[in-house]
Amino acid sequence: MFGSYGWGDGEWMRNWQEQCLKDGAIMAADPVICNDSPDDAALEECRSLGEALA
């Protein structure tokens, strides 16, 4: 899961992850949450997420 937000602290993404897990989803990796556009750390997390999905 990847989510970008322009306000708040990304709570909606954490809530979405929690609901997905409650519904029985299996996450390939931890979600990537960033403010607006990904910084270097978030880009690396996105690459790791892509590798986990591939």
Image (cartoon, rainbow, N blue to C red):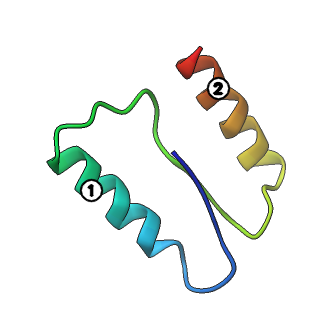
Q: Residue furthest top?
A: 54
Q: Residue at x 43, y 72 (%)?
A: 12
Q: Residues within 10 Å of mark 2 (few under 14, many from 20)?
A: few
Side (left or right) of 25 relative to 32? left
Q: Earlier in the sequence, mark 2 or mark 1?
A: 1
Type of amino acid at the residue the image marks with label 1:
Glu
> On the image, which quarter does residue 38 sit in?
bottom right
Look at the picture and state if 17 lies above or below 48.
Answer: below
Inter-mark Cα distance, 2 to 1: 21 Å
Residue to which mark 1 is pinned: 18
Could you say where residue 30 lies in the image, as x and y percent from the top left? 46, 40
Q: Residue at x 17, y 46 (%)?
A: 23
Q: Residue at x 29, y 30 (%)?
A: 26
Could you say where residue 29 lies in the image, as x and y percent from the top left? 46, 32
Could you say where residue 50 lies in the image, as x and y percent from the top left? 65, 26
Q: Residue at x 63, y 85 (%)?
A: 7
Could you say where residue 5 lies in the image, as x and y percent from the top left? 64, 73
**Which mark is drawn over residue 33?**
none
Q: Residues within 10 Å of mark 1 (few under 14, many from 20)?
A: few
Report the quarter where the C terminus lies. top right
> On the image, which quarter does residue 3 sit in?
bottom right
Type of amino acid at the residue the image marks with label 2:
Gly
Q: How many marks?
A: 2
Side (left or right) of 16 relative to 40? left
Q: What element does badge 1 sit on?
A: helix
Look at the picture and state if 16 lies above or below 45.
Answer: below
Q: What element does badge 2 sit on?
A: helix
Q: Are marks 2 and 1 in contact (CB under 8 Å)?
A: no
Residue to which mark 2 is pinned: 50
Look at the picture and state if 25 lies above or below 52.
Answer: below
